[in-house]
């Protein structure tokens, strides 16, 4: 039985730290493999392997210019990740809003206690 690829989607592809590093490099613009190798100090075969995976899942595009291959980030490929993270961002925003409300209520309560005359119940 053939083993399923562990890099068949965006989530699995970016689970590898070197692939995330490559995406970080490509945020700055289109780059040849050699420049990525220089930026990350990992071997050319490793960079090429990771670029292939990133290309297969749609995170990176490649174009040929003569003998060189130039790679660029495909931001649209990050949409599944963005959509997934957005759910959790909304959750955390709601929790932080509740915390802010609670802290504001505590401050108002402390302010009321500070304004009461000494000895007052």
Image: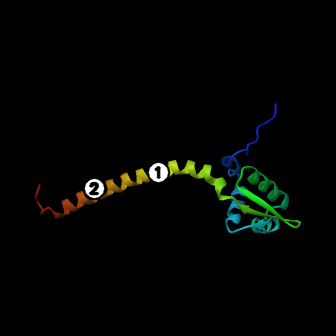
Q: Picture coordinates of residue 88 (x, y %)?
A: 51, 49
Q: Picture coordinates of residue 78 (x, y %)?
A: 64, 54
Label number found at residue 80: none
Which residue is depicted at the point 76% across and 50% down?
A: 56
Which residue is depicted at the point 71% across and 50% down?
A: 13
Residue on which the image places disc 1: 90
38 is higher (above) or lower (below) than 17: below
Could you tell me which quadrant the C terminus lies in?
A: bottom left
Picture quadrant where residue 43 is located: bottom right
- 108 left or right of 21? left
Which residue is depicted at the point 22% across and 62% down?
A: 111
| Front position in the image: 67 or 96 | 67
Upstream in sequence: badge 1 or badge 2: 1
Residue on which the image places disc 2: 105
Q: Picture coordinates of residue 27 (x, y %)?
A: 67, 65
- Count neighbours of disc 2 (C-alpha within 10 A) and say few if under 14, some if 14 to 19, many if 20 or more: few
Mark 1 or 2, which is nearer the eye?
A: 1
């Amino acid at each position: 039985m053939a083993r399923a690829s562990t890099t068949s989607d965006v989530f699995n592809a970016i689970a590898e730290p070197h692939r995330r590093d490559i995406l970080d490099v490509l945020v700055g613009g289109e780059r040849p493999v050699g420049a990525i190798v220089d930026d990350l100090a990992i071997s050319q075969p490793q960079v090429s392997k990771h670029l292939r995976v990133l290309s297969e899942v749609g995170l990176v595009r490649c174009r040929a210019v003569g003998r060189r291959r130039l790679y660029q980030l495909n931001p649209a490929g990050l949409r599944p990740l963005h959509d997934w993270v957005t759910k959790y961002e909304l959750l955390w925003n709601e929790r932080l809003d509740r915390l802010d409300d609670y802290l504001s209520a505590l401050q108002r309560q402390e302010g009321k206690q500070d304004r009461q005359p000494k000895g007052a119940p």
